[in-house]
Image (cartoon, grey):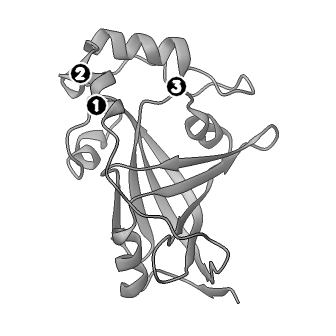
């Protein structure tokens, strides 16, 4: 049975920190709903009602486009190990793009990622847990090195060109700000 809480408690924070993957869900006022898996060392719980996560370059950029229209966001974690649990955080998010005021302070919370496009700052208004009894057991093996190999094979200009070519609009044709020129050039170096 689902239980709801106004904020994350210490056990829930520990559960989040122990997971290797999380899912983000966003949607604009119309168009498609997006659910995307995220991994790597890209998420920080900063308090009982605040989570920030760094969005790395990918094939799409739906979250950025959706948040330009509506700031709703849901994050979800599933236990694939011994304890069956699903945890969701609901709230409103702000987007920080490379070069925005406050980018460097948020970026410093994470390992250096040359392909970081945005950092999302989620203000949690509801936490929900549910059983997860139907979630299968799965074993974590390791992080994939595919993203890092891709980044290592690109120049900073190549990465920005990719953002303009592949990440400047959502699949519904909405803007994402990925084609904005960074004002903080040292981010990519």
Q: Quadrant of the C terminus?
A: top left
Q: Position of residue 53 (x, y in %)?
A: 40, 52
- CB under 8 Å between discs 2 and 1: yes
Near-viewer residue (174 or 41): 41
Near-viewer residue (77 or 145): 145
Which residue is denoted by mark 1 in the rendering?
A: 148
Near-viewer residue (64 or 87): 87
Q: Quadrant of residue 67?
A: top right
Q: With 6 as the anchor, is 142 left or right in this view?
A: left
Residue 177's tag is: 3
Mark 3 falls on what kind of element? loop
> Gap in Å between the C-alphas at discs 2 and 1?
6 Å
> Gap in Å between the C-alphas at discs 3 and 2?
24 Å
Name the residue at 25% across, 12% down: 155
Q: Does label 3 or label 2 sit earlier along the sequence?
A: 2
Residue 152's tag is: 2
């Amino acid at each position: 049975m689902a239980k709801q809480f106004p904020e994350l408690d210490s056990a829930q924070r520990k559960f989040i920190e122990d997971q290797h993957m999380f899912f983000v869900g966003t949607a604009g006022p119309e168009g498609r709903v997006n659910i995307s898996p995220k991994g790597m060392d890209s998420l920080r719980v900063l308090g009982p009602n605040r989570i920030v996560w760094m969005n790395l370059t990918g094939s799409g950029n739906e979250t950025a486009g959706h948040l330009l229209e509506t700031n709703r966001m849901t994050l979800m974690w599933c236990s694939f190990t011994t304890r069956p649990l699903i945890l969701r955080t609901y709230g409103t998010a702000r987007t920080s793009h490379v070069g925005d005021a406050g980018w460097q302070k948020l970026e410093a919370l994470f390992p250096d990622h040359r392909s970081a496009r945005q950092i999302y700052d989620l203000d949690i208004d509801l936490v929900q847990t549910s059983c997860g009894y139907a979630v299968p057991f799965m074993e974590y093996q390791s992080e994939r090195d595919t993203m890092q190999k891709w980044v290592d094979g690109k120049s900073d200009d190549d990465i920005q060109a990719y953002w303009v070519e592949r990440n400047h609009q959502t699949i519904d044709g909405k803007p994402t700000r990925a084609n904005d020129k960074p004002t903080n050039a040292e981010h990519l170096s």
